[in-house]
Image (cartoon, rainbow, N blue to C red):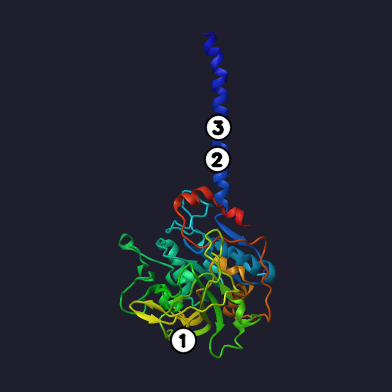
């Protein structure tokens, strides 16, 4: 009996501790769920830009919050940034989770959609917001992997939006998916040597006075991500703005460097290489890396898009690359493009190198959207 009396308060103490732990856990989960997107309020009369992130390789979850902050704090735009998340762990970013991006309902009121996703297979109730936005003919900016933004496999055969997929081979307007119809190209191949050759942006022919080039010197658009292969010529209604010059690295490869040892000061042009059984000059012809296009999905109004295949998080270390994207926002919104827009980075911008990460990396990193503010 004496032992029972002694054990009773210990049991109560244990139960209180357990309840406190569960309460704290629920509090953290509730807090994360309350922050499923990054919302930056600007001036009431300014447009709303919705950024959609979700790629496993080029750190869109780092790149797009930085661009949103620049556009919000320097230019007053209202911005919302959406992220890939496991619905069982709301508020925690997981680019490897391909079937959920909460917050797409914000496209209903959006004036511009900026998309930087890769091979997503979103459920119908989320895809519908993208489809409805495009039917209205509203402007679209696609960054890097947005050319292959979606991919629906056989297991997604019940999706009503399989035609958005990169490998959609149905005859008709949707052949090649969202990338081909809306942006002008889908995934083809790497044109540069991925991880070993960088990209310098040069003016396309007769683009000297185009407003997208406002405030940008030719050698200031640069990034360590390589040039993507594009089928030439671009589709009708497309106009190349920036051409991508492929550059060999001067320094040694450094896996611990976010730019892998490449720098904007690199100037060595590559020699001819063998590709698909033939010798090619990677800079003749050059591939476009920024272009504009008119689009119209079936049953929708006509709109316009701008695609930039340069734009990985590490590419945005360069002010010229950031300015091209900021200029593109003004251009797509039919606003006067500043002569030299303020694109100063917000906070300490030290992006991660591009590359794939396994699930354990994201579990350990535990990157919450709340930390993005």
Labels in figure, total: 3
Residue 220 % position (x, y) = 62, 77
Q: Please say whether residue 290 is visible from this viewpoint.
A: no
Circle on res. 280: none
Q: Secondary structure at mark 3?
A: helix
Residue at the location (60% across, 88% down)?
208
Q: Is residue 76 left or right of residue 94?
A: right
Residue 273 % position (x, y) = 41, 78
Q: Is residue 145 left or right of residue 208?
A: left
Q: Nearer the viewer, residue 191 or 180?
A: 191
Against 21, is 113 above or below? below
Q: Please say whether residue 29 is visible from this viewpoint.
A: yes
Mark 1 = which residue? 237
Spatial separation of the CA atoms under disc 2 and disc 1: 54 Å
Residue at the location (37% across, 67% down)?
161
Q: Secondary structure at mark 1?
A: loop
Spatial separation of the CA atoms under disc 3 and disc 1: 63 Å
Q: Quadrant of the C terminus?
A: bottom right
Residue 89 % position (x, y) = 49, 49
Mark 3 = which residue? 19
Q: Nearer the viewer, residue 60 or 369?
A: 60
Residue at the location (33% across, 78% down)?
277
Mark 2 = which residue? 25
Q: Secondary structure at mark 2?
A: helix
């Amino acid at each position: 009996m004496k032992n029972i009396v002694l054990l009773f308060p210990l049991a109560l103490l244990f139960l209180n501790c357990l309840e406190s732990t569960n309460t704290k856990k629920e509090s953290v989960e509730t807090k994360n769920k309350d922050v499923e997107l990054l919302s930056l309020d600007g001036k009431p009369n300014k447009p709303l830009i919705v950024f959609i992130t979700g790629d496993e390789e080029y750190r869109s979850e780092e790149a797009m919050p930085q661009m949103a902050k620049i556009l919000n704090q320097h230019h007053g735009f209202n911005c919302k940034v959406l992220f890939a998340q496991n619905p069982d762990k709301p508020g925690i970013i997981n680019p490897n989770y391909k079937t959920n991006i909460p917050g797409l309902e914000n496209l209903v009121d959006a004036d511009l959609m900026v998309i930087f996703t890769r091979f997503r297979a979103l459920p119908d109730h989320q895809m519908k917001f993208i489809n409805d936005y495009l039917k209205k003919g509203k402007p679209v900016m696609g960054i890097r992997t947005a050319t292959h933004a979606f991919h629906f496999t056989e297991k997604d055969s019940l999706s009503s939006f399989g035609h958005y997929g990169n490998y959609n081979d149905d005859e008709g307007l949707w052949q090649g998916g969202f990338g081909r119809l809306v942006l002008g190209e889908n995934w083809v191949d790497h044109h540069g040597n991925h991880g070993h050759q960088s990209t310098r942006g040069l003016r396309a022919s007769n683009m000297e006075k185009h407003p997208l080039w406002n405030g940008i010197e030719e050698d200031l658009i640069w990034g360590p991500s390589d040039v993507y292969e594009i089928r030439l010529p671009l589709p009708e209604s497309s106009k190349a703005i920036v051409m991508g010059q492929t550059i060999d690295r001067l320094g040694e490869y450094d896996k611990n460097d976010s730019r892998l040892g490449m720098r904007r000061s690199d100037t060595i042009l590559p020699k001819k290489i063998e590709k698909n059984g033939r010798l090619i000059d990677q800079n003749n012809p050059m591939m476009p890396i920024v272009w504009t296009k008119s689009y119209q999905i079936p049953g929708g109004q006509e709109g316009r898009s701008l695609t930039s295949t340069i734009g990985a998080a590490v590419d945005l270390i360069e002010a010229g690359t950031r300015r091209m994207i900021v200029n593109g926002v003004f251009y797509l919104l039919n606003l006067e493009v500043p002569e030299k827009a303020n694109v100063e980075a917000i906070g300490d911008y030290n992006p991660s190198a591009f590359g794939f990460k396994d699930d354990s990396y994201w579990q350990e990193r535990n990157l919450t959207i709340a930390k993005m503010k």
